[in-house]
Image: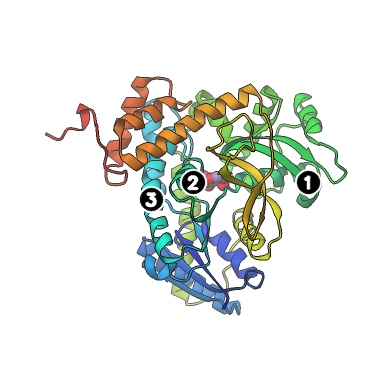
C-alpha cells in the first residue's frame, strides 16, 4: 500500500506548485492517492477537476480525487499538507485597509492584519486537528497555513501528540537568492539562522570550503556594491512587492549589520515606511486577487470547458519543492537540513524553552532534530521576547475569545503605537470579522447591539 496525500485547503491559489511537484515526484514519495480537500466547493471542484485531468493526461498512475467531506479526506491519510485561508484573500484585503485607516500596517501575517487572520485561522485549524486525532493520528502534518508564527505556537500547545511540522517557504527562498548571489549551488551552502517565523536572522553562510560568506555579503552591502540579492532572471523580480522587499531587506542589513534579517522584519523595524509605501486603495490582497487568483481559476475554467489539460502546465516553484522535499526526507529518513518552527527546548539557550522558534533542523523519519544555537544578542532577544508575548496572547485570545487578551496582544504588537490605536483598530476588525472570529467575551460598549 502506497501513501495517501491530502491537501487541506486544496482549492488554494498556493496549491498548483505543490500539485506539480507531487506529480513529478510521486515515485519518490510512493504516493498512490492524492485528495484535494477544501470547505469551499467551488474552488475545490475547479482545482480538483483540473488536477484529475492534468495527472491523467500526463500518464500519472496516482488516484486523484477532491472532496468537501473532511472525514473521507482524512481517513487513511499518511501526509497532510495544510494551507487554509478562512475569509480568503478578500478578507485579507479588508483587514489591510482597516489597519491602514488607523495609521498602521495591515499585512496578512504581521501587525493587526496578522492578528485578525490568526483569529480566523486558529479555531479552524484546531477543529481540523481534532479530526486528525480521531481519524489519522499517525499522519504527518506539514503546515504552511499562516500566520505560521502564531499558529505553530497554538499547535505546539494544543496538539503536542500529533506529528506536525510548521514550515514557511521564506527562509528557503532567501537562501536560494543568497546562493544565486554567490553563484553557488544551494546544496554547497550551510545556513545558520535563528528567530521566529517571519522574524529571524541569518548568522552564518558557510560555503563548501567551510568559509563564512556573511562577512563578504556585509562588506558588499556596506560599500554599496549590492542593494539586492535577487538576480535579474529571478521570477519574483516581475512582482514589484518582492523586488522592493528584497531591496529593503538589504537596506535593513546595512542599518543593522550584525546579522542578515528575514525580509519580514521590514514590518517591525520600519513600520512607518512600510505604511507609507502601501496604497490603501490597492493593497497586496487586491493585487493577489487580481493576479494569481484570477489567473489560476480562469485557467481551471478554461481547461474544464475544453475537456483537456494537454495545453496547460503548472509551475513547480520553491513553495512546492520545499514541502515535498520535507515529506521525502521523512519517508526516506534522509536527515537533510531544513528550517522549521518547533519548540525551542533550549536550542536558543537564553530564550523561553517552551516557546516555538524557527531554526534549522535535520529531518528524518523520526521528525525534526534541532541544532544548538546557544546565546543570542540582546537586540534580537528583546525583539523576539516582545513578539513572542504578542503571539502567545493572540493564541489565548483566539482560544478563549477574551477581548482583554486581544487588546493585550494588540498593544504588545510592535506595529501598534498605543492603547487607543489598538482598541479602535480591533473594534473595526471585529465588526468586519464577526462571523469569522471566535465568539468574543468581555466586549466593550461599542459592540452592544441596540
Ligand atoms: C511568502 C511567505 C508566505 C506568504 C507569501 C505571500 O511565501 O513565506 O508566508 O503567505 O509570501 O505571498 P502573496 O503573493 O500571497 O503576497
Ligand atoms: Mn511564510
Residue at point 31% right, 26% down?
Answer: 424
**Mark 2 surroundings: few (<14), some (14-19) or many (≥20) residues within 10 A:** many
Q: Which residue is mark 3?
A: 86
Looking at the image, how many numbered discs can be counted on the residues? 3
In which quadrant of the rendered view does residue 25 lie? Answer: bottom right
Q: Residues within 10 Å of mark 3 (few under 14, many from 20)?
A: many
N-term-proximal mark, 2 vs 3? 3
Quadrant position of the C terminus in the picture? top left
Disc number lying in front (1 or 3): 1
What SS does tag 3 mark? loop
Give the residue drawn at x 42%, y 68%: 73
Pick whichever of labels 1 and 3 is earlier in the sequence.
3
- Residue at the spot 47% in from the left edge and 26% down from the top edge: 415
Q: Where residue 317 sits: x, y (%)?
A: 63, 56
Residue 443, by quadrant, is: top left
Residue 281 seen in the current view: no
User: What residue is disc 1 on?
Assistant: 189
Residue 336 image offset from top left, x and y in percent? 71, 54
**SS at circle 1:** loop
Residue 114: x and y in percent read 44, 38
Mark 2 → mark 1, Cα distance in angstroms: 30 Å
Local secondary structure at mark 2: helix
Examine the rendering and report whether any part of residue 406 can be seen.
yes
Mark 2 to mark 3: distance in Å?
21 Å
How far apart in space, not on screen, are marks 1 and 3 (Cα)? 37 Å
The residue singled out by tag 2 in the image is 156
Residue 221 in the image, given as x and y percentages of width and height: 75, 28
Amino acid at each position: 500500500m502506497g501513501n495517501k496525500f491530502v491537501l487541506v485547503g486544496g482549492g488554494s491559489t498556493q496549491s498548483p506548485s505543490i500539485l506539480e511537484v507531487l506529480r513529478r515526484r510521486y515515485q519518490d514519495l510512493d504516493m498512490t492517492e492524492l485528495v484535494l480537500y477544501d470547505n469551499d466547493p467551488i474552488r475545490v471542484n475547479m482545482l480538483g477537476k483540473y488536477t484529475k485531468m492534468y495527472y491523467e493526461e500526463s500518464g500519472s498512475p496516482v488516484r486523484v480525487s477532491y472532496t468537501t467531506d473532511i472525514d473521507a479526506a482524512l481517513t487513511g491519510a499518511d501526509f497532510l499538507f495544510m494551507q487554509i485561508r478562512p475569509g480568503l484573500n478578500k478578507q485579507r484585503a479588508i483587514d489591510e485597509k482597516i489597519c491602514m485607516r488607523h495609521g498602521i500596517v495591515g499585512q496578512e501575517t504581521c501587525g493587526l492584519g496578522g492578528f485578525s487572520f490568526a483569529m480566523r485561522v486558529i479555531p479552524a485549524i484546531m477543529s481540523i486537528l481534532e479530526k486528525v486525532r480521531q481519524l489519522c493520528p499517525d499522519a504527518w502534518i506539514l503546515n504552511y497555513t499562516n500566520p505560521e508564527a502564531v499558529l505553530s505556537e497554538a499547535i505546539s500547545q494544543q496538539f503536542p501528540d500529533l506529528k506536525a511540522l510548521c514550515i514557511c517557504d521564506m527562509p528557503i527562498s532567501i537562501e536560494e537568492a543568497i546562493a544565486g548571489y554567490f553563484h553557488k549551488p544551494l546544496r554547497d551552502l550551510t545556513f545558520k539562522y535563528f528567530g521566529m517565523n517571519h522574524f529571524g536572522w541569518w548568522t552564518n553562510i558557510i560555503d563548501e570550503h567551510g568559509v563564512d560568506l556573511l562577512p563578504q555579503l556585509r562588506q558588499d552591502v556596506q560599500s554599496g556594491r549590492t542593494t539586492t540579492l535577487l538576480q535579474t532572471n529571478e521570477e519574483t523580480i516581475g512582482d514589484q512587492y518582492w523586488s522592493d522587499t528584497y531591496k529593503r531587506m538589504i537596506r535593513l542589513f546595512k542599518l543593522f549589520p550584525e546579522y542578515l534579517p528575514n525580509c519580514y522584519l521590514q514590518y517591525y523595524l520600519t513600520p512607518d515606511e512600510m505604511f507609507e509605501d502601501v496604497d490603501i486603495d490597492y493593497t497586496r490582497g487586491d493585487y493577489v486577487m487580481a493576479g494569481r487568483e484570477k489567473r489560476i481559476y480562469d485557467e481551471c475554467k478554461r481547461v474544464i470547458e475544453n475537456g483537456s489539460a494537454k495545453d496547460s502546465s503548472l509551475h513547480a516553484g520553491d513553495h512546492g519543492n520545499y514541502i515535498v522535499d520535507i515529506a521525502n526526507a521523512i519517508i526516506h529518513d534522509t536527515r537533510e537540513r531544513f528550517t522549521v518552527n518547533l519548540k525551542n527546548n533550549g536550542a536558543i539557550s537564553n530564550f523561553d524553552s517552551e516557546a516555538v522558534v524557527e531554526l534549522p533542523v535535520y529531518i528524518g523519519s523520526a521528525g525534526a532534530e534541532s541544532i544548538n544555537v546557544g546565546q543570542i544578542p540582546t537586540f534580537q532577544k528583546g525583539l523576539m521576547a516582545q513578539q513572542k508575548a504578542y503571539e502567545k496572547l493572540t493564541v489565548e485570545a483566539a482560544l478563549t475569545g477574551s477581548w482583554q487578551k486581544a487588546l493585550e496582544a494588540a498593544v504588545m504588537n510592535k506595529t501598534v503605537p498605543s492603547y487607543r490605536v489598538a482598541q479602535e483598530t480591533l473594534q473595526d476588525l471585529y465588526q468586519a470579522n464577526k462571523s469569522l472570529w471566535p465568539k468574543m467575551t468581555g466586549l466593550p460598549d461599542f459592540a452592544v447591539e441596540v
